Amino acid sequence: MVHWSSLLPILGSAFSLTAAAPPEEPTAQVVPGAYIVELAENHDSASFYNTLGTDKVAVKHRMKLDYKLFKGTSFQLQNVSDVDDAAAKIANMAMVKQIWPVRIYHMPQDEVVWTGQDKNLAQSALQKRQAGGNTTDTFSTHVMTQVDKLHAQGITGKGTKIAVIDSGIDYLHPALGGGFGEGHLVSYGTDLVGDNYSGFNTPVPDDDPIDECAGHGSHVAGIVAAQANPFGFTGAAPDVTLGAYRVFGCDGPASNDVLIAAYNQAFEDGSDIITASIGGASGWTEEPWAVAVSRIVDQGVPCILSAGNIGSEGLFYASTAANGKGITAVASIDNIRNPQVITNATYSTGNSSTNSSTESFGWTPGSPAKWGNVSLPLWNINNDPTDTANGCDPYPADTPDLSEYIVLIHRGTCTFVEKVTNAVNAGAKYVLIYNNVEGLFSVSAAVDGVLAIGVVTKETGEEWVADLAAGITVTVNIIDPTVAPIVVTQPPNTATGGFLSTYTSWGPTYEVDIKPQVAAPGGLILSTYPRALGSYAVLSGTSMACPLAAAITALVAEVRGTFDPTELQNALSTTSNPNLFNDGATTYPYLAPVAQQGSGLIQAYDAAYTKTVLSVSSISFNDTDNLIETTNFTITNTGTEDVTYGIANVVAASGYTLDKGTILPMLFPNELVTEGAKLSFSEDKVTVPAGSEVAVSVSVSPPALDSARLPVYSGYITLNGTNGDSLSLPYLGVVGSMHDATVLDTKHTYITRSNDTSSSPLPANSTFTIPSMNGTAPNATAVLPVAVTYLALGTPLLDIQILPTDGYNSSSLGSIFGFPTSYVPRKQSTWTWNGQLVDGSFAPAGTYKFGVKALHIFGDASKESEYDTAETVSFTIKYS
Ligand SMILES: *[C@@H]1O[C@H](CO)[C@@H](O)[C@H](O)[C@H]1NC(C)=O
Ligand SMILES: *[C@@H]1O[C@H](CO)[C@@H](O)[C@H](O)[C@H]1NC(C)=O
Ligand SMILES: *[C@@H]1O[C@H](CO)[C@@H](O)[C@H](O)[C@H]1NC(C)=O
Ligand SMILES: *[C@@H]1O[C@H](CO)[C@@H](O)[C@H](O)[C@H]1NC(C)=O
Ligand SMILES: *[C@@H]1O[C@H](CO)[C@@H](O)[C@H](O)[C@H]1NC(C)=O
Ligand SMILES: *[C@@H]1O[C@H](CO)[C@@H](O)[C@H](O)[C@H]1NC(C)=O
Ligand SMILES: *[C@@H]1O[C@H](CO)[C@@H](O)[C@H](O)[C@H]1NC(C)=O
Ligand SMILES: *[C@@H]1O[C@H](CO)[C@@H](O)[C@H](O)[C@H]1NC(C)=O
Ligand SMILES: *[C@@H]1O[C@H](CO)[C@@H](O)[C@H](O)[C@H]1NC(C)=O
Ligand SMILES: *[C@@H]1O[C@H](CO)[C@@H](O)[C@H](O)[C@H]1NC(C)=O
C-alpha cells in the first residue's frame, strides 16, 4: 500500500494559530487484490466473467464499466488458492487490453474556515440582503474573474449541463434548487456508491445523489450555480443545470473504478462540461482514471479538475486525474475578501439596571453550540489582555462556581480543549474565546460538561476585559444562535488576497507536461453547504477553484458558441493574468512560476470576447535531453479589422526542483531565481489580416542554471494587439535530464513490520511467521514483512522481487504478488507481503531479501541499466 503523506492546506490567514488541524489524508492507496481491466473490442464484462468462470478464477464483481469510451470491469480476487496465477492469467487473457490495480483518491483536504450551525439557516432571512432590484454582481470572486461583467450582460450559462462528480449535492437546499430531476437546478445524476462506501468496500449504488453527510459536493455545486439566497451571492453560472454524480460515501475516499464509471456515465448522459474536485498525488498522465478522462476531453467535453492541495511538496507534484492530457487543472488563488458570517447578540455593562447600557456585538458559535437564550455575567481568570496563556492552567481553588457565568478566555498558547477543560473543571457551562488576531473563526472543543462555546473578536474581548478590570459587570445576552440575526461581512484579505494559495499543488508532470493550466479563487470561499451541516460554509482549497473555473468555462462557451475543449482552454489560458509570487507572508518582485499558477487568474470576460485565438494553451520545451529548440503557434484574428501584435517574452521565476547536493526535491517554497529563458520569435511584430491566421515560430535558449538540481524555468509570451487584445501564453522547460535523475532513494528503502505504524527499519535476520496461506488471506492481526520504498521522484515502473541472501548476485524468485506496478508517485510507500509471488504461488519458507527496482523517467524498461536498485537486509519467513 502506498503512503502519500501530505501537508495540509494552511492559509496565510491568521486562523491557523491554535485552531484544530484538519485530519491528515489517509495513507492506504491501493485496494488489495482489486483490479480494473480494459477489454478488447467486441468483448464485454459478461464474456470476461464467463471465461474466468471456465478458468475457475474466483472473483467478486465490483463495477461494470461497459461504456462507449471504456469497456471493461473491475473485480476483487476472492480466492487465489485455486489457481496459481490468477492475476497473471487474467493479464494474459486475449480479451484483456490492460489491467491496473484499483487505487483510491481523496477529496482534497480543504480547510473548513466556517460553517453555519443550523439547517434553518438555509431559510432564515439575513439582515443585510442585497438591495432588491440591483443585479450588480459584487461577489468578490466574481469581480476578480470578470464574471460580474458577463452577468451584467445576462450571460449565466443557460442551457448548459455541468456534471459535478463529488459527494452528491443537497438539492433540497433552497439555494440549490429545492428538488431533483427535470425542471430543477440539479436535474440529473446518480449515486454510484451509497452512504457506507469507504473507498475499499463494494459500492452500493442507488438513484439518489443527495449530499446529506459529507458537504464537499454541495459547496462545490453552489460555487457553480447557487441560486439567489439571503447571503447575497449566486453561483458563477446560475442558469446551468447540474448533474450530481456521487462517488464518496459519508466518510472516506473514492476508488478509480468508481471515478471512471462516474465520468463515463456523466459523459453518456450528455454533460457539456464535467467538473471534479478530487485527486491524488501522481505526476503521470498514464494513470487509468486520467486516461479515461482524457478520452472524454477528446470527444469534445471540457473536463476541469482541481490541481490539488499539496503545494507543500514543491515542484513536480501534480495530482491525478488533473494531470491528464487535455484536462484543465485549476490552481487556487486566495480571495481578496475574507467572508465572515457573524451572529448578533447584545451585552450590557453596569452594576444595576438604572446605570447600565446595552450594545450589540458580533460572534460565531462554536461546537458544541447548545446556547439557547443565555444571559449571564462574564468571568475571566485574570484581566490581562496580553496574557495569551490565559486559562491554560487549572483554575485556583478559590475560583467561584462558574456555572453562573460565561467564562471569557483569551486565545493562544495551549489548545482550546485544554482551556475549556480547565474552565469546565471549575463548573463552567458556557465559554467565549476572544481572538488574538483580527476576525472570527469556527472553534471546536468537545469537552464533557461544556454546553456551548463561541468566539468574539479581539476588539470585543479587549473592551470587556477593560470593563472587568475596572470592576464593571459585563452581562452577555446571547440570542439562541439558531434564530439570532446574522450578517455577512467581507473585510479585505490584505495578506494573501489575489495571490496563489500556498497550498496549491505544483506541476509539471514527470514527462514535463505543463500543469496546472489556469488559476481561480479557491481560498476563503463562501458557498452553500448541506442543510444538515449548517447550510452555508466558508472553505479553502483547489476544490473551490475548480468549480468556479468550470462555471466560467460554461459562460465563455455561451459567448463563443462552442464547447470545444481546445478552443476554450486556449482562450481561458491566454487571457488570464499571471501574478507575483507570494509565500503566504511576503510578496516577491517576480512572477510566480507557471508550475504553480499556470496561466494565472482566469479573466472570464476577456476569454469570452477575445478576437485573438492562439492554436495552443501553453508550450512545454521539455528537458535538456528532449529540448524542443524551435516550435510554433498560430495567431488567428477572428475580428473584422487587421491587427498588429507586438510579441515579447516576460520571464517568471525559475525554481530548483532538488535540494543542493541531494537527490531529493525541495519543499515549498522552492529556491527561486530570476534567471529565465531567452526566447526569439520569427517576428517581434506580426500583422494578422482580419479573418486570417499567421504562424509564429519560437526558439528557446534555456537559462544557464545548475542542471543537477533540475531547475524549472517558465514565463509568458505576451501579445499586444492594436485592437486592444492582450494575451499571454505560458511556457515552461527543465534544465537537465529527467532521465538521468535518480528516482530511488536507496538509503530509505528497507524492511519493517506490518504492526509498526511508524514504519521503523528492522535489523537484519528478523523472522516472520506467516499464517498458513492455504485458501485464506492472513487476517489483520498477522505480523507480516513490509517493504518500504522511498522514491525521490516518481517512477514509471516499480518492481519488488524476492532475492536469496546474496541479493541480485543470485537469481530472483520473481516479483511479489501485484508487481511490477506502474506510474508510482514519489515519496514513501509501504508494501506488505504475505509470502505470495506474482504467479500466485507462495515463496517457500526461507531467508530472503527484498530487491527493489525503479525505472528511470523516460527509461527503457527492457534494459537493466535503466533502473535504480536497492536491497534490504535479510529476513526469514516461516508459515504457521
Ligand atoms: C477457494 O476456492 C476453492 C476452490 O474453488 C474452494 O474450495 C475454497 O472453499 C475457496 N476458499 C475460500 C476461502 O473461498
Ligand atoms: C448596485 O450596487 C453596487 C454596489 O453596491 C453599486 O456600485 C451600483 O451603483 C448599484 N447599481 C444600481 C443600478 O443601483
Ligand atoms: C448586529 O450587530 C451590528 C454590530 O455588531 C449592528 O450594527 C446591527 O444593528 C446588529 N443587527 C441586529 C439585527 O441586531
Ligand atoms: C518530452 O520528451 C519525452 C521523450 O521524447 C516525451 O516522452 C514527452 O512526452 C515529452 N514531453 C512533452 C511535454 O513534450
Ligand atoms: C509547427 O510545430 C509543429 C509541432 O509543434 C510541427 O509539427 C510543424 O511542422 C511546425 N510548423 C512549422 C511551419 O514550423
Ligand atoms: C504589451 O503591453 C504591456 C502592458 O501595457 C507592456 O508591459 C508590454 O511591454 C507590451 N508588450 C509589447 C510587446 O508591446
Ligand atoms: C509487532 O510484532 C512483533 C512480533 O510479533 C512484536 O515483537 C512487536 O512488539 C510488535 N510491535 C508492536 C508495535 O505491536
Ligand atoms: C544474518 O544472517 C546471515 C546468514 O543467514 C549472516 O551472514 C549475517 O551475518 C546475519 N546478519 C546479522 C546482522 O546477524
Ligand atoms: C488471526 O491470525 C492469528 C495468527 O494466525 C490467530 O492467532 C488469530 O486468532 C486470528 N484472528 C482472527 C480474528 O481470526
Ligand atoms: C491445503 O489444504 C489441503 C486440505 O486441508 C491440503 O490437502 C493441502 O496439502 C494444503 N496445501 C498446502 C500448500 O498447504
Image (cartoon, helix red, strand yellow):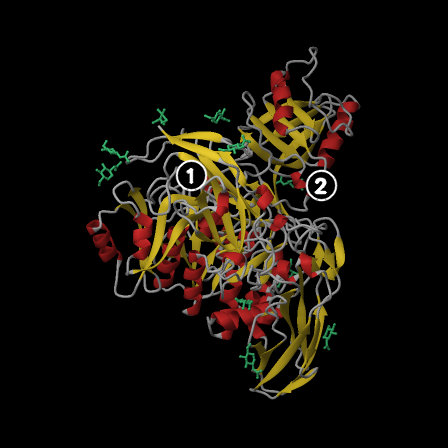
Of 240 and 649, the residue lying toward us: 649
| Badge 2 amino acid | Glu
- What residue is shown with label 1? 833
Q: Nearer the viewer, residue 527 or 815?
A: 815
Identify the disc placed on residue 438. Answer: 2
Residue 599 location in percent, x, y? 62, 65
Q: Which mark is residue 553?
A: none
How far apart marks 2 and 1 lie (CA) works out to: 52 Å
| The C terminus, quarter of image | top left
Q: Is residue 272 visible?
A: no
**Element marked by disc 2:** loop
Cβ(mark 1) to ligand 7 < 8 Å? Answer: no
In this rendering, position of residue 95 left or right of residue 384:
left
Q: Earlier in the sequence, mark 2 or mark 1?
A: 2
Q: Residue at x 63, y 58 (%)?
A: 596
Question: Ligand 1 quadrant?
Answer: top left
Helix, strand or loop at label 1? It is loop
Q: Can you see residue 29?
A: yes
Q: Is residue 372 above or below residue 802?
A: above
Q: Is residue 368 above or below residue 492?
A: above
Residue at image location 61% in from the left, 58% down from the top: 138
Residue 126 screen position, x and y as percent: 56, 45
Q: Is residue 67 rendered to the left or right of residue 325?
A: left
Name which quarter of the figure residue 152 lies in: bottom right
Q: Residue at x 50, y 36 (%)?
A: 874
> Mark 1: which amino acid?
Trp
Around disc 1, counting alpha carbons within 10 Å, would you say few (fewer than 14), some (14 to 19), or many (20 or more)?
some
Residue at (66% x, 34% y) in the render: 18
